[in-house]
Image (cartoon, rainbow, N blue to C red):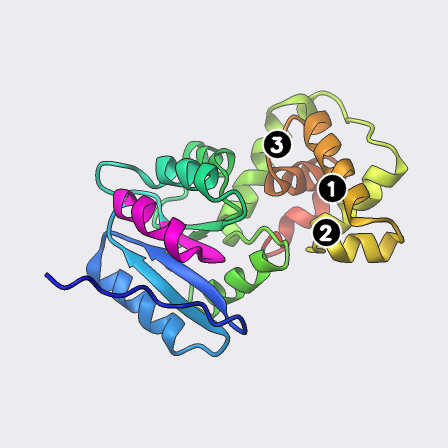
Amino acid sequence: MAIRPEKKHNPMMISVAVVEDNPGLRRSLELMLAESPGFQCVAACGSGEEALQKLPRCTPDVVLMDIHLPNLSGIECTAQLKQLMPKVLIVMITIYNETDKIFKVLRAGASGYLLKRSSPDEILHAIADVMKGGAPMSPEIARQVVEFFKATGPGATEKVELGRRKEEILSLLAQGYANKEIAQTLSISLDTVRTHLRQIYEMLHVRSRTEAVARFIADRQPDLAARPSIR
């Protein structure tokens, strides 16, 4: 069987890979990306094993990942991809919204979590959003994340005092600001922002900006939980 050549990146486009075992949905996502200005599908894989072989070679910016893949699950594939490609951004797309799976996905290194019933515009917006440093989630997922942090962890019994600068950074993070935008807004260096973020994660006992944003909303800005999504 002839090997399909890998697509080359167009630097003017966001390069996306699709990992989905349903052939029809995989093809639909490919076509959606092909027909959308500013986006390029560089790989479409039917299994986690195939993704681990292909994606390190084509280095996509963003991966749309199904959670329920045969054999190697989307959660396991996400964790292994993040080890191979630390900078890759992974958005999980699934028909499920179970809380336990949401947090396994986020802790494996995913940057967002969408339901498969999301519209093409919502998926494309999520891809663009995650490239800017956002944490896109379907509304139902965002509410579950917020409720989880209200009910569990250190934030359930005490508010962690981060200090003024870290609070400012976390507030901007919750508004969808990328690291560079935070640095510019606060007139500090990018390295300083990264150092503060690492310390914030440690203090809040979280592993990603997505979890940090959810903790911020649950602990400090509960009114934001009613908004349609977390950016």
Q: Residue at x 54, y 74 (%)?
A: 12
Find residue 114 and report its horizontal and vertical position in percent: 45, 53
Q: Where 66 sits versus 83, above or below?
A: below
- The answer to whether the residues at label 2 and label 1 have Cβ atoms under 8 Å apart is yes
CA neighbours of label 3 inside 10 A, class few (<14), some (14 to 19), many (20+): many
Q: CA distance from mark 2 to mark 3?
A: 24 Å
Q: Amino acid at mark 3?
A: Phe
Residue labelled with disc 2? 179
Q: Residue at x 87, y 52 (%)?
A: 186
Instruction: State whether residue 177 appears in this view.
Output: yes
Quick one: quadrant of the C terminus? bottom right
Residue labelled with disc 3? 149
Q: Answer with left or right where residue 89 lies relative to residue 53.
A: right
Q: Callout 1: helix, strand or loop?
A: helix
Q: Callout 2: helix, strand or loop?
A: helix
Q: Answer with left or right where residue 49 lies relative to residue 107.
A: left
Quick one: quadrant of the N terminus? bottom left
Find residue 3 and report its horizontal and vertical position in percent: 19, 62
Residue labelled with disc 1? 194
- The answer to whether the residues at label 3 and label 1 have Cβ atoms under 8 Å apart is no
Discs 3/1, front: 1
Numbered range of the magenta stretch: 48-65
Q: Quadrant of residue 208?
A: top right
Q: Residue at x 65, y 26 (%)?
A: 205
Find residue 70 and report its horizontal and vertical position in percent: 22, 41
Query: Magenta segment: does it hold 60?
Result: yes
| Mark closer to the chain start, 2 or 1 | 2
Q: CA distance from mark 3 to mark 1?
A: 23 Å
Instruction: State whether residue 113 appears in this view.
Output: no
Discs 2/3, front: 2
Q: Amino acid at mark 2?
A: Asn
